[in-house]
Image: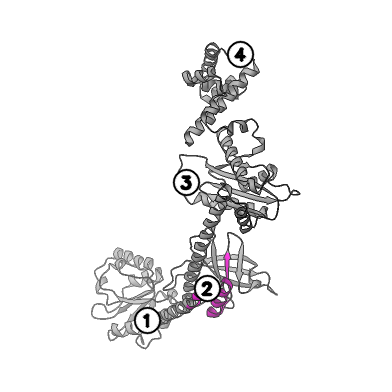
């Protein structure tokens, strides 16, 4: 109902519209009586204000301007002023302000009763609200019955179509998947977007899209209502209502509101089920990788349940993410999102592959034949580079460890290989590394040692004592050798003056008696420095 409608009411017969004629189509949501000018405290959008001018009689022109600006900001639909003993005619200032703010100004005689106006305006509004609420609970009841049947998404959308008499679609924009009651309406070109004004009892945010349907013959130009469906998962869902041939009504919105809530619950159920399955699968793969399956039959059963038992060979790959800035607080939901993007990308690239995900790590097991290449560093690098280009690793860097090729009984061995490779990458290399276990070389010898004493026996006591007595000099020596004995680069890495570096190197020559031209002696020091890193890493881990 709008202002034009109430001017036709019997109660307002003989009334005059004397200002704000451009607002004659303003929608009406209610009616109120003005007794004081504190309208900011009680005024509501769409209300019609009744007044005998008593509350306005002592306002100055400036006060009136402020008051009518408030009316416009609130969204008051119209002002009705009764001509009575307080006012025999409406002041020009008020007429001017109503025209300025496009607020219809209606003049009524003293014989018209407020009660009659209020009842005649509120009657249709109350009836409309009752119809909307009845529609809401009617749809809610139907959807509750539908939920007990555990329907598919196709069935749910089909039921929505029956209720709303329009085609509907559910879009998973994250995965690029669309389910629709009419596939011809899936291929569109969006030519415009506008917000949908909030209807009564509507809580979700809606957008209206002007679209061209490209697959219809001939092409159709139409409109869509779109609403985002909030839920717990990582995918983004939108419900689309195709407004063909005409726009949806207020009652239709009651169906849609119920529909969005219903889909929320269905997506929540699917998410909970998927999380339970995800955790079960994680646990099974963890048992397989960590040698907690003691019979070959158990291994066979697990491989069959994971559907990775078609071929003879297996490889394990571990991808671990590290924050680029360890001091920066990162959203706790960000890491799972990154790992999810990684595993989805690899699952689309490799058919016979499963994954284990936890904290900041995703571990893959690939099953392949002797005629297939398996996990090749060059291929993995291409995939990781594509993820980098898509900004997946913003705020993170990664290490990728790849095991050797093994048969099913040696999958735990392959897991140990990637864990050992990750240790080396973390200790000795910079960000974004990809390394197969087979390329570790001499580090394999040291990684096989089970205790710190085994590692220490490979270090010369002379070098060990020097590191213990002169830790700063040993750090300088290590950096100096790692930079090919370059004084300038060493000074930059240690934030020292080049003269300070030269002084320290001279002191090292005197104390350690090292000959920087002897490759064997230099090799001993470099091996010792890396073993110290391994020992310190194990101490920190323990």
Give the Cα distance between marks 2 and 4.
Answer: 79 Å
Mark 1, secondary structure of its residue: helix
Q: Nearer the viewer, mark 2 or mark 3?
A: 2
- How far across and down, in percent of the image, does residue 137 sit? 43, 79
CA gap, disc 2 and disc 3: 39 Å
The Cα–Cα distance between marks 4 and 3, rounded to whole angstroms, is 48 Å
Residue 392 seen anywhere in this rendered image of the structure: no
Between marks 2 and 1, how big is the CA–CA gap? 36 Å
Report the residue marked by disc 3. Answer: 330
- Numbered marks: total: 4
Whichever of labels 2 and 4 marks the residue nearer the N terminus, that label is 2
State the residue in front, 230 or 35. Answer: 230
Q: Earlier in the sequence, mark 4 or mark 3?
A: 3
Sequence-earlier tag: 2 or 3: 2
Looking at the rendered structure, the secondary structure element under dot 4 is loop
Does residue 241 appear in this view?
A: yes
Query: Which residue lies at the image location 47% right of the left edge and 78% below the top edge?
Result: 139
Camera-near label (1 vs 3) is 3
Q: Is residue 100 above or below residue 387?
A: below
Tag 4 residue: 515
**Distance from Cα at disc 1 to Cα at disc 4:** 98 Å
Mark carried by residue 126: 1
Q: Is 376 placed above or below 29 here?
A: above
Q: Between disc 1 and disc 4, whose residue precedes?
A: 1
């Amino acid at each position: 109902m709008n202002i034009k409608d109430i001017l036709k009411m019997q109660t307002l017969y003989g009334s005059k519209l004397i200002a704000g004629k451009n607002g004659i189509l303003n929608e009406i949501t209610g009616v109120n009586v003005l007794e004081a000018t504190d309208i900011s405290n009680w005024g509501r959008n769409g209300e019609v204000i009744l007044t005998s001018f008593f509350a306005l009689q002592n306002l100055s022109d400036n006060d009136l301007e402020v008051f009518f600006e408030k009316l416009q900001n609130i969204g008051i639909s119209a002002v009705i002023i009764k001509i009575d003993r307080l006012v025999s005619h409406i002041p020009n200032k008020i007429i001017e302000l109503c025209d300025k703010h496009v607020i219809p100004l209606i003049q009524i005689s003293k014989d018209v009763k407020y009660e009659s106006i209020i009842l005649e305006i509120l009657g249709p509004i109350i009836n409309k609200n009752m119809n909307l609420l009845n529609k809401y609970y009617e749809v809610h009841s139907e959807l509750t019955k539908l939920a007990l049947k555990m329907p598919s998404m196709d069935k749910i959308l089909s039921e929505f179509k029956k209720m709303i008499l329009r085609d509907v679609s559910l879009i998973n924009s994250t995965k690029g998947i669309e389910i629709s009651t009419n596939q011809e309406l899936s291929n569109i070109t969006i030519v415009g977007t506008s917000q949908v004004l909030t209807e009564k009892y509507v809580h979700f945010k809606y957008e209206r899209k002007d679209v061209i349907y490209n697959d219809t013959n001939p092409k159709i130009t139409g409109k869509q209502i779109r609403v985002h469906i909030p839920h717990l998962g990582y995918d983004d869902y939108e419900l689309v209502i195709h407004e063909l041939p005409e726009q949806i009504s207020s009652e239709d919105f009651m169906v849609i509101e119920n529909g969005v809530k219903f889909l929320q619950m269905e997506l929540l159920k699917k998410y909970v089920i998927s999380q339970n399955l995800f955790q079960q699968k994680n646990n099974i793969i963890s048992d397989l990788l960590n040698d907690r399956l003691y019979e070959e039959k158990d291994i066979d059963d697990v491989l069959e349940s994971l559907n990775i038992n078609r071929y003879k060979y297996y490889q394990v790959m571990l991808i671990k993410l590290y924050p680029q800035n360890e001091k920066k607080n990162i959203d706790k939901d960000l890491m799972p999102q990154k790992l999810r993007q990684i595993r989805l990308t690899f699952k689309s690239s490799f058919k016979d592959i499963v994954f284990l995900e936890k904290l900041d790590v995703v571990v893959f097991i690939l099953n392949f034949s002797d005629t297939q290449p398996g996990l090749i560093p060059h291929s993995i690098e291409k995939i990781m580079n594509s993820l980098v280009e898509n900004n997946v690793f913003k705020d993170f860097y990664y290490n990728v460890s790849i095991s050797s090729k093994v048969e099913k009984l040696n999958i735990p061995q392959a897991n140990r290989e990637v864990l050992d490779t990750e240790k080396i990458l973390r200790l000795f290399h910079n960000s974004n590394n990809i390394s197969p276990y087979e390329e570790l070389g001499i580090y394999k010898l040291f990684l096989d040692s089970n205790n710190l004493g085994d590692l220490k026996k490979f270090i010369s006591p002379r070098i060990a004592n020097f590191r213990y007595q002169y830790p700063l000099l040993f750090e300088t020596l290590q950096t100096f050798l790692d930079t090919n004995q370059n004084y300038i680069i060493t000074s930059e890495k240690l934030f020292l003056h080049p003269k300070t570096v030269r002084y320290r190197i001279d002191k090292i020559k005197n104390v350690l008696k090292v000959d920087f031209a002897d490759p064997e002696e230099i090799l001993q020091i470099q091996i010792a420095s890396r073993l110290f890193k391994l020992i310190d890493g194990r101490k920190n881990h323990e």
